[in-house]
Image (tube, grey):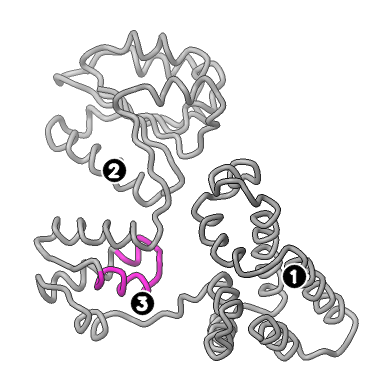
């Protein structure tokens, strides 16, 4: 059996790897498990691990971490898998793959190929619902979304909070979430810009305050605002193209482009350029004048909201 685990969602990938390894070890013992790192292991040793038969057990499992970093392994992957003994279960872990490479294209054709991508808020809510079922508990989609908004998008933190909630009650609701989980400010610079463009000055000011409460310095906020405006400018310049096309050309996440498209519809390209210029002026003034950074940035955001 051959399994390939890849993708940027490290939590999901590692969770699947732990599950597969635990199931194998429970049946065949950890003496039948071999782990090798492609960055530290030569091709001959990798080849030997795949070709050797299990010792004192019916099957063996080989877990290879980023073996594609070994050029010889990547070049010979097709023959290596073709010659793999039926008694060997192989797991190839490749968090980062070049999708243009023949190595990636070959692995993707394998039936055991699994790609773990980052989850958006709704994806996290669905994942929490499934995780709750595994713990003989239940949480509605709306309450799962509320838990994400309250705790944040870190899957490890969400898993820990869900574990606590499921021990408290098999029916996880908003009341339990409010009583048992910490309310962590989870505002983002995108939400800050979104509120400003929507004309919601109160929320924009509140979100700016949250960023500062999270110890984000004004210069960091300027840098993040500049990045968001950069994405906005790319979306505006890509008028007529799909979010997927823009994302591919600009090497951005399609999810990020789709979110930014909502703002892009309410602003012209000329206005986008003006905002970039005004932010640059603030940055330059802060470097040469005794300017109150918070006042300058808040005024900038409120100008957007007018």
3D distance between C-alphas at marks 3 and 1: 34 Å
Position in image of residue 113 (x %, y %): 34, 30
Q: Which residue is mark 2?
A: 16
Which residue was labeled with disc 3? 150
Q: Earlier in the sequence, mark 3 or mark 1?
A: 3
| Rendered residue at 56%/74% (across/down) | 194
Task: Determine whether, in the image, residue 290 is placed left or right of residue 211.
Answer: right
Displayed quadrant of residue 293 = bottom right
The C terminus: image quadrant: bottom right
Mark 3, Cα crowd under 10 Å, few <14 / some 14-19 / many 20+, is: some
Q: Which residue is mark 1?
A: 271
The mark found on residue 107 in the picture is none
Determine crowd level at label 1: few under 14, some 14-19, many 20+ residues with C-alpha closer than 10 A: few
Q: Mark 1 vs mark 2: which is more N-terminal?
A: 2
In this picture, which residue range is highlighted in magenta? Answer: 142-158
Q: Are marks 3 and 1 in contact (CB under 8 Å)?
A: no
Q: Are marks 3 and 2 in contact (CB under 8 Å)?
A: no
Q: Earlier in the sequence, mark 3 or mark 2?
A: 2
| CA gap, disc 3 and disc 2 | 26 Å
Q: Magenta stretch containing residue 113, yes or no?
A: no
Q: CA distance from mark 1 to mark 2?
A: 46 Å
Which quadrant is the N terminus positioned in? top left
Tell me if residue 8 comes above or below residue 199 in the rendering.
Answer: above
**Most extreme residue toward the front, as rendered?**
240
The residue under the point 52% across, 15% down is 75
Element carrying mark 2: helix
Q: Nearer the viewer, mark 3 or mark 1?
A: 1
């Amino acid at each position: 059996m051959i399994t390939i685990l890849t993708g940027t969602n490290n939590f999901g990938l590692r969770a699947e790897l732990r599950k597969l390894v635990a199931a194998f070890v429970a049946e065949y013992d950890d003496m039948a498990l071999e782990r090798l790192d492609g960055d530290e292991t030569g091709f001959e040793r990798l080849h030997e691990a795949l070709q050797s038969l299990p010792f004192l057990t019916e099957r063996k499992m080989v877990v290879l971490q980023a073996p594609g970093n070994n050029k010889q392994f990547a070049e010979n992957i097709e023959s290596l898998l073709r010659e793999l003994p039926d008694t060997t279960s192989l797991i190839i872990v490749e968090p980062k793959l070049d999708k243009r490479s023949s190595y990636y294209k070959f692995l993707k054709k394998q039936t055991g190929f699994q790609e773990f991508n980052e989850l958006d808020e709704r994806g996290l809510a669905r994942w929490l619902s499934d995780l709750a079922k595994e713990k003989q508990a239940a949480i509605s989609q709306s309450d799962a979304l509320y838990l994400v908004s309250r705790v944040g998008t870190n899957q490890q933190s969400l898993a820990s909070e869900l574990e606590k909630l499921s021990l408290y009650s098999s029916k996880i609701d908003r009341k339990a979430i409010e009583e048992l989980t910490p309310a962590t400010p989870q505002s983002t610079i995108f939400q800050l810009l979104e509120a400003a463009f929507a004309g919601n000055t109160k929320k924009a000011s509140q979100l700016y305050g949250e960023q500062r409460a999270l110890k984000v310095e004004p210069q960091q906020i300027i840098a993040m605002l500049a990045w968001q405006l950069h994405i906005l400018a790319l979306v505006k310049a890509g008028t007529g193209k799909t979010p997927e096309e823009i994302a591919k050309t600009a090497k951005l996440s399609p999810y990020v482009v789709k979110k930014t498209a909502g703002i892009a519809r309410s602003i012209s390209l000329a206005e986008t350029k003006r905002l970039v210029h005004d932010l640059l002026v603030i940055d330059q003034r802060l470097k040469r004048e005794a300017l109150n950074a918070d006042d300058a940035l808040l005024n900038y955001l409120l100008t957007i909201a007018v």
